[in-house]
Amino acid sequence: MTVLGEAATFKRDWLDGFATTYGRLVRKVPGAYGVVTRDRPRQGKVAVVIGGGCGHYPAFAGLVGPGLAGGAVVGDVFTSPSAEQVYRTAREADNGGGVLFGYGNYQGDVLHFGLAARRLAAEGIDSRTVLVTDDVASGPADDTARRRGVAGDFLVFKVAGAAAERGDDLAAVHAAAQKANAATRTFGVAFGGCTLPGAHDPLFTVDDGAMELGLGIHGEPGVRTVGRLGPEALADELVDGLLPELPCQGRVAVLLNGLGRTKYEEMFTVSTRVHERLAAAGLTPVHTEAGEFVTSLDMAGLSLSVMVLDDELAELYAAPCDTPGYRSTGARLEPVEPVRTADAGLERPAPGAAAGPVDRALSAAMVRLEEAEDELGRLDAVAADGDHGLGMTRGIRAAVAAARGAEEAGEPVSGALLAAGTAFADAAGGASGALYGVLLAETGAGLEGRGVGDIGPAALADAFDGAVRAFIALGGARLGDKTMLDAIEPFRRTLREGADAAAPGAGPAEAAGCWAQAAEQAQQAARATADLTPAKGRAARLAARSHGHPDPGATSFAHLVTAVSETAGEAVGLEGS
């Protein structure tokens, strides 16, 4: 991924755009790469001035506003701002109450902010400094002064800004910030490196199937490479990295921080397990945030920060603030119960004796669609979002579970198919889920009142004819649009022709033969969709790209009906009882 912007002008261009976009909240410091609050605070208020290299938004400029920082200064990407830039920004932010500098513990920042503090002192402006040292991966527990400041920056700055907002003097604001830093720990993971402005290659890469633990926020890799973990195992790894340095009990604020490319929904998959693990260790999460607070350009990854709260830190952390990157009207600090949803539809039905003909038929289709999941995903990714294989697996598993439950409860074929169709649509979602759902349910409706032994070629063809009419009415597809219908209609037509040619009174055995012939036609038709151009659905927007590739929906339908045909006498409607 290439970041927009040119390396030489990136700092200037993004800060100008930021100050333009959020001019209602901040104003740019004349002659400096810094911003301060638009409305000058009351005289005597401590000015909390934060900063570091750019590439970390919303840190640092995005955290300027009432209740948080009074000003922020930025350097080039991952590079400390100069002492001159720090000095000018601090002078602009000062309101007679002194300046609290806050920044991560990096040598360049220490030197340049230190030089600026000396210059302020020479002019009679008092200042103090809090070095954020929350990253447990960057130094031993008995020497925290060696540690880096990462996402814990946000938590420390939030406390300092609230202390300044309530009117604390410089010594008290500094003490609160120091306490917040001592109470905060962070551990992070990266799935992929970040790309500098103007570059085309990332600073580092992570092999497929791997992740980097203990990363920083300046494009450096982690301290340890491990295999790619799922959400719960990753949550365990992050919490385990912090627990040795946290107390055995107490209230905590929790921060899940995205590093630039890992977004909210992905972080939420980790959050419940983090909450459970902290609670199991005796800690009480009373406020959890998930989002981007201290990023690393477009790095893929996230970090977990925990701040242990006493009464003072709780009050300051909960205080309101209003900045471009973070707003709060006042946080509610109270325990919540983690949410765990049991969804049987997401589980694969256990193998075993089938409850009835619908269960047997759909179980065969389930095996076939599971085997084809990757193929269907690749076909769908050609001109859509690549989720068709996963959707079919989810849908058919839910359909099998529902049909099994219905048949165990004594439902006939029609009731089992209705239950299967409803479950398929619910679990699979999307257009395909709804369309498969209507095919199953409407086929069942057409077989209402018939026992298995009463389902011959004519009855089966009639039921499927009705299902296809409902399918077309719901989806609006036409032959040649390169959709599921391009396999469904040849299947329906062949099934109808076989039924019309069957002898009067033909039963389930003859229906089996008609179904098998129709399935062969569906397979041929699905392959032939490679020569079509999509005219409906998301694939239509990338029609040219789809040419030469079979339609995923038509392919999954052919797989399903072929698997059912292979069950022969076990499939619904294909054999008498």
Image (cartoon, grey):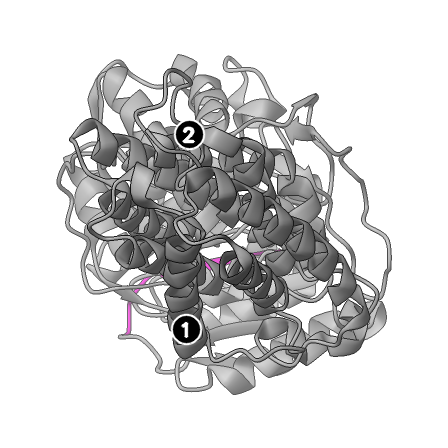
Q: Can residue 54 be seen in this view?
A: no
| Side (left or right) of 209 relative to 243 | right
In-front residue for pair 236/130: 236
In the rendering, which numbered label is found on residue 544?
Answer: none
Q: Residue at x 45, y 75 (%)?
A: 472
Task: Assign the C terminus to one quadrant of the image.
Answer: top left
Is 415 included in the stretch rendered in magenta?
A: no
Q: Where is residue 69 in the image (x, y as percent from the top left)?
A: 40, 62
- In magenta, the rendered stretch is 43-54
Residue at 79 percent across and 39 percent down: it is 205
**Place of residue 321 in the rendered image (x, y in percent of width and height, measured from the top left):** 28, 64
Q: Which type of secondary structure does the marked residue at label 2 adopt? A: helix
Residues at marks 1 and 2, CA–CA distance in whole angstroms: 26 Å
Q: Residues within 10 Å of mark 1 (few under 14, many from 20)?
A: few
Q: Nearer the viewer, residue 378 or 254?
A: 378
* Residue 530 horizontal side relative to residue 159, left or right: right
Q: Which mark is residue 360?
A: 2
| Residue 47 x %, y % | 39, 63
Mark 1 or mark 2, earlier in chain: 2
294 left or right of 405 in image:
right
Amino acid type, callout 2: Arg
| Residue position marked by numbered label 1 in the rendering | 469
Q: Where is residue 201 in the image (x, y as percent from the top left)?
A: 86, 53
* Residue in the picture at 51% in, 62% down: 500
Q: Residue at 56% across / 39% down in the picture?
A: 565
